[in-house]
Amino acid sequence: MSIGYLCEHKFQEEKFYKIAFKVMENLKIQTDLFRILNGDPTTLFYLSKERAKFLLSENGFNGSLMTSKRIIEYIFHLCGDDSKCLSLAKSAVNYAFLESMKILSSKMPFVSYESIEMVNRKLDEY
C-alpha cells in the first residue's frame, strides 16, 4: 500500500466522522426540543414549550427544512462535487441516524426522520 492511498483513506475517514457528528448533533437538538414539548425534564434546554414548538416548526431553525439545509451545506463544504465523497456522505448520514436512534431512543421525533429524508433526497440528486 502506498502512502498516498493511506493518506487518502484517512482523509475520507475523517470526513465521514465529521459529517456523522454534524448529523448527530442536529438530531440531538431536535430530540431535546421534542422532549420539552412532551414535558420531559431530562433535557438540557430550558425553553418554554411554545419556543420549542416554534424552533421545530416548518420555518423554525431546528425544523426539517433548515436542519437539512445546514447538513447539506456542511456536506458540500467538505466534499464539493466529488462524487466519491458525496457517496461517503450518504453513508455517514445514515450511520449517524442509526447511531442516534440507539443513543437517544428508538423513537425519534418525526422532524428528525423528515430531516434525514430531505438530506438523502438532496444527495441522491447529485
Image (cartoon, rainbow, N blue to C red):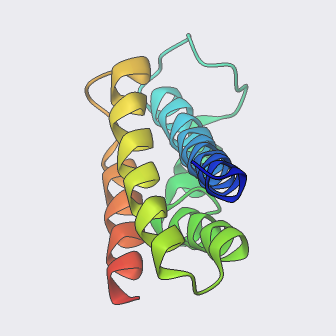
Question: On the rendered structure, is 114 left or right of 115?
Answer: left
Where 88 falls versus 112 (above or below)?
A: below
* Residue in the picture at 53% in, 69% down: 85
Question: x, y (%) of residue 37?
Answer: 47, 34
* Residue in the picture at 47% in, 21% down: 39
Question: On the rendered structure, is 83 left or right of 106?
Answer: right
Where 52 falls versus 99 (above or below)?
A: below
Residue 81 vs residue 97, the one in the foreground: 81
Outermost residue toward the front in this view: 1
* Residue in the picture at 63% in, 73% down: 79
Outermost residue toward the left in this view: 106
Find residue 122 and report its image quarter. bottom left
Question: x, y (%) of residue 45?
Answer: 70, 26
Total number of numbered labels?
Answer: 0
Question: x, y (%) of residue 19?
Answer: 59, 52
Q: Quadrant of the C terminus?
A: bottom left
Where 35 falls versus 18 (above or below)?
A: above
Question: x, y (%) of residue 83?
Answer: 47, 81
Find residue 99 and report its image quarter. top left
* Residue in the picture at 51% in, 60% down: 63
Residue 6 vs residue 24, the one in the foreground: 6
Question: On the rendered structure, is 31 left or right of 76?
Answer: left
Outermost residue toward the top in this view: 42
